[in-house]
Image (cartoon, coloured by chain):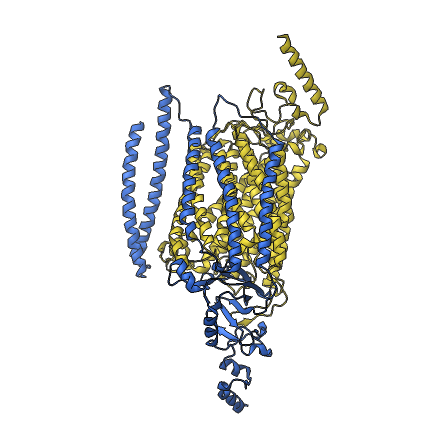
Chain colours: A blue, B yellow
Amino acid sequence: MAFKNLINSKKIAALLAMLLLGSTQLLMAQATTADAAAATDDTDKSAMWLGVGYYVLLFLLLCIVVAIIGRIIKVYDLSNQLQGKKATNWNNVMAIMCGIFLVAGGIGAYWSFAVQGAMSLPEAASENGVKTDEMFTTTTILTMIVFVITQILLFYFLAKYRHSNKRRAYFLPHNNTIEKVWTIIPAIVLTILVVFGFFTWRTITNTTDVKGDINIDVTGHQFAWELRYPGKDGKLGKKYYKLVTGLNNLGVDFKDRNSFDDLKADTLVIPVHKSIRINIFAQDVIHSVYMPYFRLQMNAVPGLPTFFKFVPTITTNEMRGKVGDPNFEYLLYCAKVCGDAHYNMKKIIRVVSDSEYQAWLSHQKPYLSDGLKTELKMVDNNQPSNQGAVNRLALNN
Amino acid sequence: MSTLSVQDHGVQHDHDHDHEHHHDTFLTKYIFSQDHKMIAKQFLITGITMAVIAMILSILFRIQLAYPDKSFPLLETLLGRFAPNGRLDPGFYLSLVTIHGTIMVFFVLTAGLSGTFSNLLIPLQLGARDMASPFMNMLSYWFFFTASVIMLSSFFIEKGPASGGWTVYPPLSALPKAMKGSDMGMTLWLISMVCFIASSLLGGINYVSTVLNMRTKGMDLWKMPLTIWAFFLTAILGVLAFPVLVAGVVLLIFDRSFGTSFYLSDIVLNGKVLSFEGGSPILFQHLFWFLGHPEVYIVIMPAMGISSEIMSVNSRKPIFGYHAMVYSLIGITVLSFIVWGHHMFVTGMNPFLGGVFMITTLIIAVPSAVKTFNWLATLWRGNIRFTPAMLFAIGMVSYFISGGLTGIFLGNAALDINLHDTYFVVAHFHLVMGSAAIFGMLAGVYHWFPKMFGKMMDERLGYLHFWLTFIGAYLVFFPMHFMGLDGVPRRYYAFTEFESMKRWLSVNMFITWAAIISALAQVGFLFNFIYSIFWGKKATQNPWEANTLEWTAPVEHLHGNWPGEIPTVYRWPYDYSKPGAEEDFIPQTVPFSQTMSSNLPHDFEENEAGMKAHEAWVAANKSNEEVK
């Protein structure tokens, strides 16, 4: 009986393999037709259903195979019992599985750490990031020790203390000493982490303004970031959301003289080893300025201006050498879900030397564009290049 | 402690089983039932249905993440306008993520888990005829059912379901024009949640009052099984935390529909200046997480209680440190109310406040660590029987360790800066809250299936289900940690727009296939579940040789649980493998007078008469031996 079933299941396995081959071909064909954008054709529809049918059939067959294997094991067990042998001890099988899982899981976790761990971020490109990474290393070491020990104990105990009729479990309802020990030890470890973490956090979020901070406005809206740099005066002009128009899309208030020389930029260019203060705004919904290479994140909240201060330490060119990718760019993402195109709010950050920064800055366009001046009907005598526009304005009046 | 214990009330109810002849109609027995066992089954089956739906949603968005450039005509056939040309619409992708999260957190792991097992076990393990208020209990289920229907109905409206993430942060959720899902879908989400919270409160109040008032004779608080302690504290958490979410949700409804500005200020949407002034989006986050953080303990504590009970039964060993287990549950309950700010480290909240929340957050790791060590000590030198329930309870512990440890990273404000809203968070909470709590729930289903349906589930299919799911979930969530460490943000529709994320596509493909395999493994569970209800082997009264009261009730369900008097309780529920006892278990209903050979002095704390009897017996025994 069991033997018959075995043959049966082999046949089914062969059939399964054939089906698998057939269905993959079908899927490939389907993919190409979809590329041709002719998915609505009747023939394609039927091909699609055929493909789905194959997969459903495949799954059903798999279920049948599992059922048959289950039957075989049962029959095998019964025949063994008839011959006076012992039935399969599932308890032992499970205990052995736990042992195997411990070994295989250990290898798997190690592999994951080695291969995927190596894919994580390169060294921090900012001063605060270095501190974060130190904290991260400490935490990782401590938690990994606990992880390894507890998982090993868990699965080792399972494999070792499996059920036996000859033995009784050890009646141990409690032991106050050991309970105190393992309350106090985690408490101490966590106190260490809390203290270090607290001071790291306080240093990173240190809010004292330093003279010579470079203030940059980053404003998020669906679905882009706008950048505003201060001009020669080093000060950014005020903003008010009700002043937003098509041309003045940040709502800059031009009653504030500081705003006259503000600059507009497409790329977040910052000088290395300078204290940068990013002022973060949002116009519509919550966004989040996320710059992973600098270990920096701060939400952009409408109605609640936030900021993040940091000092970049590695220029883009240096980082390109370090990661071995000549096209590498630092990026700014949005990390807080903000709508359909949330996954595509990219801004390039470029860390450059101070001289390069000054040169780049001098090429940026003023925020107060000619069009905006017209719209605001304002005269700016400081900039002779705009004389024409002013004259036109005068004529119109 | 025994001051709260209620004396036997079985006598008044004694006529209950004589009333059997006033028969239930189909409607009162299966639909509008007021019997706690039937309501538990209703919660369980609705919960499983919702879990399957949410799982299918997750497979849909996993397919999108693995094959962002591929077209699947089947998706268009099934989803229509939500998947034009066989590719998921980015807005619908966010809807899937949102509804998956909402259903799993609230409908499966809150109602499905607490609803099922609190209802089933509180009266049965405490020795009560039913809940304090069976009618409220029935209402609780029907509010839950209504909430489920409303939530799912949002798939059938024109613009699709809510899509601002399960945390529904305003202004995204408050401005109907901010995204498609913030229109009608969001309205339905809010209505559904209000119904859900009503259900949760009706249930919670019932659980608390039943535990406090309806325990059988002898069942003082320190004789309650850990399951009951967990459900009791969970219910307290829910009763205190959910009303705050109602407040948050109602204000959001006002902002959406009546033009108020609780959460809104300084908004320019699509170039149009809106008139909202003076509100704060952060206020919503405070209100949401004041519930939201206790909520994750509402999810995990029942799983902890269930696992503790199952591990003790199947190790044939008392749970190690019963008191410590209870005190750590109480510690978690209290602390969980003062840690919510760790979800908001980078929202622009005052950094000093962030520091304070970091301290409270890391303190909560201490009771969690104590629980883990106590579970390990329970297994140590046990006599372990691997029932499927036991395996799932062990899986819960393994996940809880893995996921709990990554919580120490995220609870640290300095580290959270770079990990916030990345895949590291996704991996963390799916292990510690998703996988661990689901495993607790599955362990409970396997363990108490004989009690619920009077039948046994197939063990070997259970084994297959366990290993596929256990390994599968690790394969899904373990690699996600490293994606997070590479700074990949969550809720991204495709990784193709960023050069640095493209290398994670192959990992995404691997994760998706692992997810599909573990999802298919659930078919094995569903088959086992449904098949066993109808054609399973008949269960015996106490199939696991457990001590707790529910196994003294007859297999056949009857309204009132026990024919005749309710059993009296004499001892704690964990007398397994007691030296000197004949069997390796002594049910709670066995008085000490019948087990003289196995009594310990420790059993008679605060019981002088008992202690004297024990001493007399020991002395008599000694003299007997001397005579020999």
Which quadrant would residue A377 be assigned to in this image?
bottom right
Q: Is residue B88 left or right of residue B627?
A: left
Image position, residue B541 (x, y; %): 54, 27
Q: Nearer the viewer, residue B447 or B353?
A: B353
Task: Name above or below for residue B568 compared with residue B404.
Answer: above
- Residue at horizontal 64 percent and vertical 51 percent from the top: B243
In the rendered picture of this protein, how many numbered marks are placed on residues?
0
Residue B15 visible in the shown view = yes
Q: Nearer the viewer, residue B228 or B141?
A: B228
Q: Nearer the viewer, residue B447 or A40?
A: B447
Q: Is residue A225 left or right of residue B130?
A: left
Image position, residue A167 (x, y; %): 50, 22
Image position, residue B620 (x, y; %): 67, 13
Q: Residue furthest top?
A: B627
Task: Name above or below for residue B543 compared with residue A253.
Answer: above
Which quadrant would residue B287 be assigned to in this image?
bottom right
Which quadrant would the N terminus of chain B be assigned to in this image? top right
Residue B464 visible in the shown view = no
Which quadrant would the C terminus of chain B be assigned to in this image? top right
Image position, residue A244 (x, y; %): 55, 74
